[in-house]
Image (cartoon, coloured by chain):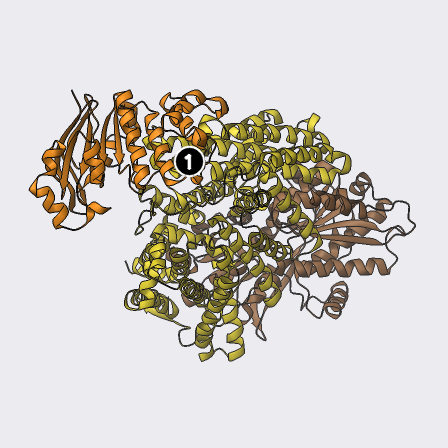
Chain colours: A brown, B yellow, C orange
Amino acid sequence: MPLSRMLLAATLASAPFIGHAAEPIKIGDMNSYTTLAAFTLPYKNGWQMGLDEINAAGGVLGRPLEVVSRDDRGNPGDAKTVASELVSKEGAVVLFGTILSNVGLAVADFAKQNKIVFIASEPLTDTIAWSNGNRYTFRLRPGTYVQAAILVEEAAKLKAKRWATIAPNYEYGKSAVEAFKKLLSEKRPDVEWVAEQWPALGKIEAGPTVQALAQARPDAIYNVTFGADLTQFVREGTLRGLFEGRDVVSILGGEPEWIDTLKGEAPKGWIVTGYPWYDIATAEHTAFKDAYMAKFKDYPRLGSVVGYVSIKAIAAAITKAGSTDSEALVKALRGLDLKTPLGPIVFRASDQQSTMGAYVGRLTVKDGMPRMVDWRFGEGAKYLPSDADAARMRPAE
Amino acid sequence: MGFYVVQFLTGLAGAASLFLVACGLSLVFGVTRVVNFAHGSFYMLGAFVAYSLTKWWGAGLGFWAALVASSVIVGALGAAIEVLLLRRLYRSPELYQLVATFGVLLVVQDAALALWGPDNLLGPRAPGLSGSVALFGQRVPQYDLFLIVLGPTVLLLLTLLLTRTRWGRLVRAATEDRDMAAALGVNQRHLFTGVFFLGSLLAALGGALQLPRAPATLFMDLNIIAEAFVVVVVGGMGSIFGAFLAAVLIAELHAFGILIFPQVTIVLVFVVMAVVLVVRPWGLLGRPEDARHRTPTEIATPLGVPRCLVVIGLIAVAAVLMAWPAMAGDYGLKLATEVLVFALFAASLNFILGVGGMISFGHAAYLGLGAYGAALLVSRLGWPMEAGLVVAPLAAGFGALLFGWFCVRLSGVYLAMLSLAFAQIAWSVAFQWYDVTGGDNGIQGVWPSAWATSPLVYYYLALAVVAAALFGLHRVASSPFGYALRAARDSSLLSEAIGIDVKQVRWFGFALAGAAAGMAGGLYAFLKGNVSPTVMAIPVSIDGLVMVLLGGVQTVVGPLLGAATLVGLKTEIASATNVWRGVLGALIIGLALLFPRGIVGHLGRWHRGGRP
Amino acid sequence: MTLLAVRGLVKYFGGVAAVAGVDFDVAAGEVVALIGPNGAGKTTCFNMVGGQLVPDAGTIHFDGHEIAGRQARAIWRLGIGRTFQIATTFASMTVLENLQIALLSHRRRLADPVSSIKSLEIAAARDLLAQVGMTDRAERQAAELAYGELKRLELAVALAGEPRLLLLDEPTAGLGKSERGVLMSLIDRVVQTRRVAVLFIEHDMDVVFGHAGRVIVLDRGRVLIEGAPDVVRNDERVKDIYLGRGAVVAC
């Protein structure tokens, strides 16, 4: 079986030479680089830039950081193999990355089983922090619940009483709708839910779906679709007049990775969470944006920020822990605070969720590109469940 | 009332692209008998090429010109692929063609990513048809009306082409009886290339027509291909009017289905297919498969490898498997365990394919049922791993008994498609039944019992279970029951005439293979520690077929070698490069061309001095 | 004693009556030839008796059982073995295995998923092989056999069920002159030693008149005449359909 010998040779060749002086600290990154290239490449740029900054400043604990990056192949089973490769074969001491919720959960489970710290950078599912949370997994990005909570605050101010929802038919869509419905109904008991549509992910039949929504005559629509589905929904809805005289609230609808495809056709007036990179004037963000644009000749996406913050958080944790030992890192990460382009964040000790927040505003079009206006920043800490509630949702350690 | 009329019209518009893609696929299948997985790639390329041409030529008339040009360009590409690749495989078993076209699909995915980048590309609205008109108090996009007219127009033109021209009559003759067409002195080479051109052109046109409605994305190929198959099968293989009917039926059921039950979207097409195939096994307008039609496994000779080679191979494999832990670390062990698990999966597929002569495109369903059975028992009921491993084959075997009862009544490609439909239904249940299966997030924390947590121990556990299962399958294959299954494969006519209940034998064979796949699924669940619906998705079924074919149909060591090759290649290439799909696709194509009867099958052939 | 009694048998294909009311009998141990021009309905009749086709009307009694419309496998179990117009065997198996499987089926042992087939029914299989004179071909794969050998193997497979009636669909078609002789004398021997009745379709008139005890002539889905070979041979109508309508006899 020559192949196994090849594998063996590869294993030996890449085995770390222990005891070398400035031997780098290896960090494993995995994300859906082929399955979701449009969303993960800006993320990769982000951590690449952060990594360069860290190493230019002398690395961590006197050693350079090295990131070994792999495609997670977009499914949980293969992701486990990749995680195992990064840890057992490449010698990574920390894992970070993933965008698909099921892949993130699988790697989180791997982290738990193998006692290795995992920074779940991008997955939106809240089960990764709560019902499926574990000691070794920390989630950076605000999850579905926080995003929905920020939107609900705006939605509750609307006059609309009859609401319809449209969401892709899978876990993310379902939890995004569930959280929104629950929180809005709490704030506005007079709200009625008059219709729901569940197109298959990536396979929306926009015409009939738009018709079906319009038929229910809602005052407002809550949208969770994204990507190609969102584009079709917007085009078809515009042509058929679905959005005329109706409020639309759209989760993630202001993130450049989702909405920029639509260019000048982006629907005006929608209330969205997102990332108005063009207008955020804090010193931290301006520095980040300028460096990013100089380095990659492209504007940052939200994923770029997430990637950048992920590697910075890892460096900060290792520094704080003074070692790369998993238990020490867990202790360091619990309560770790960090300055980021989006403002200061803390990894809460209670649920290991960061307090990164999200921007909420209204969509418009400027110079043929979608832009958020009248936006404000929603602090994650304000919308997350209390520490006590969050801890209750997590399984006992 | 007006609403329902407009909803109906909207459904018709939605059927247009699906019809174009499906009728292209149907034409190609009808004439060449190639199940072309790359057909969806032509659909995707049609959209991308049209996007680029529109940008280049401007959005006015340029759009309409781009529509035509893109179809022709992609049609020519399809013809080129036929000449360079598929032409060399017409004499191979059908499954080799299928695997080769799957390789093309992988290569095109990465090529499109390299050429057009990762972003979704939104084309202009159709010039002149960018607005909407009022109908029955509802607004209907003008472009929808155009599509509504276009579908039947293309149907009419194709019908004229097939009935009124000499070329068309040859196409029909070849669809009905390939041998007869050959006897008529038809130049098959030109005919096949021409049909591929036309089929690819139609697919590309379907893709390009989507531009005003949807962006061009890298997911278009896989998103359309399963549904195109469904339409072809529901309509009846080779029937263009059937494809039209089926496309309209599915689009309308969808348009009205979501009014009553919005969640139906995910599974609707496959339920339609399952119902149609159960009631009308050859589709709405199809005709029973030609009994003389070669079964796909007929060419591969049984026991293609001489006994001494098998024994040497088995000893060598056993030595490597036993000694492997001494050479490998935790990662190497996990990888090797994965190879073992997939070897059993491939062997179970090989069993129904090679011994039973039944092609399953949905074998991953049983891997998944086993994995879910074990995972649910452990995570929901708190039972230990040992119980999970016992339940896994039972759950999958039961599922295979249920699905198999319908499947074994069909044969050939229809059986394959029905098995795919059932797999998709199982997948969507796992995907949607959030409270039980955890939806697409799956079930976490399915770890082995304490004594088996070390990768080394789990490896030996898997080795023992897989070895026992492989031996069991081999034993059954050489038992009276196994021979009854072979008899049913060789000639169901004669089998029935000597007292064999063909359906029953095939049914039990199907269930046994399902149970073996479920055993693999149980091992998989505890190896990975989690289960998610991807384990029973189409790509896993195709992986199984690729493994079987790499190893060679009807061989003993084959599935092991096939699994090791595919798992090894995937892992090595994927950790070396992010264009692993393209590299893997090219390798698959290369292997299918070089070894049209599988790697192990070829060893046997060389040994016997090239005798076929 | 009447073994097989066919009454009023009818089969339509797309509105055309391929068999339009056929009656005939076969007695135990009798050798009967079924002849007629192409399209007369001979094979259709066979397939209804053998259970490959379901009659549209009529009855078929075999040994006191009504078998019209029953499954082929059930009919075989009652004691009717058959061969096909195009010789059909299990191509991927060896000659011996072909016989083993037929014998195992006869003894209802095919449900066994555990034993190895290698040692099962070997003696009986070799005995059958000897009867058709193919002992030296035992390990050959059926796909590699010459056509004459295939025909003999097919006959041996049909005999594995210890039938009381053999249906042979053109037993000598595609064979050379000497092979025909070998095969037909084989069948004669089987009839004598096993006391089995034979109903066979045949185009070669030498074979028909040399071996049949009785001849049934079908034309356009009906029985034209039946009787002793001499009677049939001299019947004007038979001469008419064969000689008048071309050279079917030659094939």
Observer-nearest of B150 and C78: C78
Residue B230 percent coordinates (x, y): 40, 51
- Observer-nearest of C213 and B587: C213
- Image location of residue B76, percent across then percent down: 48, 69
Residue at the spot x=60%, y=48% of the render? A145
- Residue B451 vertical position relative to residue B224 in the rendered view, above or below: above
| Residue B421 in view, yes or no | yes
Dividing the picture into quadrants, the one containing residue B271 is: top left
Judge left or right: residue B306 versus residue A22.
left
Residue assigned mark 1: B404
Question: Closer to the camera, B444 or B75?
Answer: B75
B283 vs A275: above or below:
above
Q: Amino acid at mark 1?
A: Gly
Q: Quadrant of the N terminus of chain A?
A: top right
* Callout 1: chain: B
Q: Position of residue A397 (x, y in %)?
A: 71, 33
Residue displayed at 14% across by 38% down: C217
Q: Residue at x 80, y 38 (%)?
A: A327
Number of other residues with Cα within 10 Å of mark 1, as a class: few under 14, some 14 to 19, many 20 or more: many
In-image side of C67 versus B320 (left or right): left
Seen in the picture, residue C232 relative to A158 is either above or below; the reply is above
Image spot of residue A218 (x, y percent): 42, 56
